[in-house]
Amino acid sequence: FQTRQQFLEQWMASKFIHGNTYVLKQRNNRGGERRGNFEALYVLDPCRVSVKVAPDGSVYYALSTDPLSNLEQAVVVPASEIIHDVMVPLYHPLCGVSALTACGVAATQGLRVQSQSLAFFENGSQPSGVLSTPQDIDDDQARAIQQRWTDQFTGNNAGKIAVLGLDMKYQQM
């Protein structure tokens, strides 16, 4: 139903958009003990395929119905009947992601590093610490002290002089 060029375009589009290309091999009845020769190859919709790994390590593919690929009902086939072309296997060797997704992961990580650096330097490049007192305080007092400390001695207020009562001590982490 498609030319060689269309087949290759579909293969590459599947790989670049979804990170995986799955090609189902259709065999004929000739070929003796090799279960027949190839008669057709169908590029499958990657959204209709899931990879399954058995406890013994053998790989199978669960295929949902796809009338265009002559799959009238859902079926599980062994890896020998599928050509699986993986783009960027970040998380598992059988699960690829698109190049755009792989780049997005690196970009997101970079943005998070910048965000954490900004917060650290806004706090006067000082790591956090612990306020402690030998006296017993209840939860409400602890929350009030924590909120006061956060409001008065972090962010733009980092480095200001703190006056501590209740025999409190600040220990930098």
Image (cartoon, helix red, strand yellow):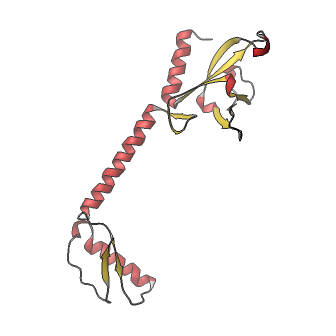
Name the residue rendered at 20%, 74% in the picture: 160
Residue 59: image location, x then y, percent: 67, 33
Image height of 63 relative to 68, above or below: below
Image quarter of residue 72: top right
Q: Is residue 46 left or right of residue 13?
A: right
Residue 108: image location, x then y, percent: 39, 45
Residue 173: image location, x then y, percent: 33, 70
Image quarter of residue 143: bottom left
Q: Is residue 118 left or right of residue 8?
A: left
Quadrant where the image shows the N terminus: top right
Residue 152: image location, x then y, percent: 26, 74
Image height of 35 relative to 147, above or below: above
Question: How many circles with numbers are drawn on the protein?
Answer: 0
| Furthest residue toward left | 160
Q: Is residue 151 left or right of residue 63?
A: left
Name the residue rendered at 40%, 37% in the picture: 103
Name the residue rendered at 77%, 9% in the picture: 30
Image height of 37 relative to 133, above or below: above
